[in-house]
Amino acid sequence: MPITRRPRAPASLGAKLVLILTAVGLLGAAALALLLATVITPGFNRLERDAVEGHVARTQAVVHDVASKVENGVRDYGDWNSSYDYMANPTAAFEQESFSTLAMVNLDVNGMAYVANDGRILISRWLDIEREADVPAMRARLNAAIAKLDVGAALKGKSSAGFYLRLGDTLAAIGVAQVRRSDGSGDPRGYVLMARAITSAQLSTLLQLQASLADPVAAVTITPSRSRTRIAVPIPGPDGRAVATAAYAVPRDLSTLGTRMLILAVVGSSLLLAVVLWVLRRMISRLVLRPLNRVERHMGLVRASGQLGLLTDKPRDDEIGSLVTSFNSMLKQLKDLREQLEVQSFTLGRSESAVAVMHNVRNALNPISTVLSQGLGRPLALDRPTMDKALAELTREDLSPVRRQKLVAFLAAAFEAIDQEREDRRDQLGIGREALHHVLEIIGMQQEAAHERPPLDACDMSDIVAQNATIARYSGETSIAFSFPSRPHWVLGNRVILSQVIGNLFANAAESIAATGRGGGSIAVAIHDKEDRVEIIIRDDGEGFDPATAPTLFQRGFSTRKHKSGGLGLHWCANSMLAMEGTLELRSDGLGTGARAVLTLGRTEIMETEEELAA
């Protein structure tokens, strides 16, 4: 792998000045070019855009004029008494006269047809005007197009219309008109249709451009390239949709002219800027940069070493001397502030550590207090004098068998209640002993945790949750139901710190449930494996919180309880999770919907091995 060397700083202030002024010159030239481009280029682009729009408008006008001329010619045949009589009584004489080669050449149309109202074609013809010969294939295509054409829709309520149709590979301008009397009276007896073939050569002659007929496009398309602009104008059919496209390319003369003017302006202004910067470089190097060289070197020394030493230099009465004095004052203030910050950080860290330990110890001692209170406040299962009286009565020889049997049953139940009470007390004392052992672990680990990063080992998350769930049930007067997975889930963390975090979260959840006033609630724990991480979700049905306040819950000193102050628990939990390379998030859908604590920790190889063995 090649070694990337850091560029060396220029050896002289003149070289530094060259770099600075070069950067300034490049930025200035770029800004000037951008300014000129914003002035020159838009103007020429607007002129070019207007020219293109003119081409489009002229093309649309040509397309409309061709269709209009055919429409005007067919309208004369439509409003004609002879045509009106022919539709009622077709005659060969009319056909020979009106459909003669001379008539079609004079009309400059290639095709003609008379169509009855029911769609029957009375007569049709397609003529090659140049050769003055009939083209049966084109006549067949014309008849097929007439059969598919909805003439009534094409007329759109008028007596005549002009549009374009595709007859195979040939584009034709179509004119259609209703057959009426010469004065426009009478019910229309059918339609007369004329067609004029349009070729690329004809279109080029009309547009005075090299144009071609292409596949239809839905709208006008303008595609600029480096030197030419491709324009495609749709040619409408009877329903207004394009049946073909008039396509051609025009040179971008205006754009080229604008580009040349822009290059000339940029080059001239850049040369002028270079001269100005060269003069400026000579002046700045002589008056400013040389005196500042020593200040800059001292700043680099401070940045590299971290030592806030003062700059010693000859006293000066100008702006450079004032800068040196201000710089030394700033260094002195920074040095004093650094020393104060180190002292305050040590004091604050020691105080926070002590308060955090007491907070965790208080949470761990709550179960012990509850167990002792329940043990002291529980009444005896049976009064001792009553049992002595029953025993004395049982020793009497004159006691009836029925009475003796009742006394024996009473004493058996009494001894069983005493045994049950002793067993319950033993269980409670065991829970208290476990909580007290938890307190001793917290205190024992505090000194080590205060001075170094906690060691991370494989921990069974399910076992830690189960242990703290058993303790949390005795942490208050509220009845809480717990549910958590029984299968081991191994994570990478510190068992003691992780147990304190879970205990704090359970304590907060219990307080949230108690705040609802229901007298009971539930806490559910779910553990999911996600690639190389493990996600633990602790969900309660307590009072919840506003999602907008979620970021403030981890702040030092914040608490949602009006009767409490502190908030150190969540703050400490979040920092502890970060120390174990994990995360802690609090989520809620709003007040009254409960809350969720989401913890993520690293996944250990032990868990993966157990899963492979289970598989």
Image (spheres, rainbow, N blue to C red):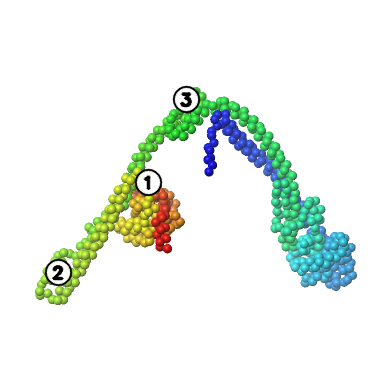
Q: Is residue 430 left or right of residue 107?
A: left
Gap in angstroms between the C-alphas marked 3 and 1: 46 Å
Q: Is residue 594 left or right of residue 54?
A: left
For residue 453, which numbered disc appears in the image? 1
SS for callout 3: loop
Q: Secondary structure at mark 2?
A: helix
Task: Residue at 34%, 46% (x, y): give it.
Answer: 449
Q: Which mark lies nearer to you, 2 or 1?
A: 1
Residue identifier under label 3: 313
Residue located at (43% from left, 58% from top): 529
Front-lying residue, 496 or 251 = 496
Q: CA distance from mark 2 to mark 3?
A: 107 Å
The residue carrying mark 2 is 390
Q: Given the image, on which type of amino acid does mark 3 rest?
A: Asp
Mark 3 or mark 1: whose residue is earlier in sequence: 3
* The C terminus, quarter of image: bottom left
Q: As shown in the figure, which amino acid type bears the numbered disc 1? A: Arg
Q: Earlier in the sequence, mark 2 or mark 3?
A: 3
Rendered view: 46 above or below 312: below
Place of residue 214 in the rendered image (x, y in percent of width and height, measured from the top left): 74, 57
Q: Are marks 2 and 3 in contact (CB under 8 Å)?
A: no
Q: Give the mark, 2 or 1, whose residue is nearer the N terminus.
A: 2
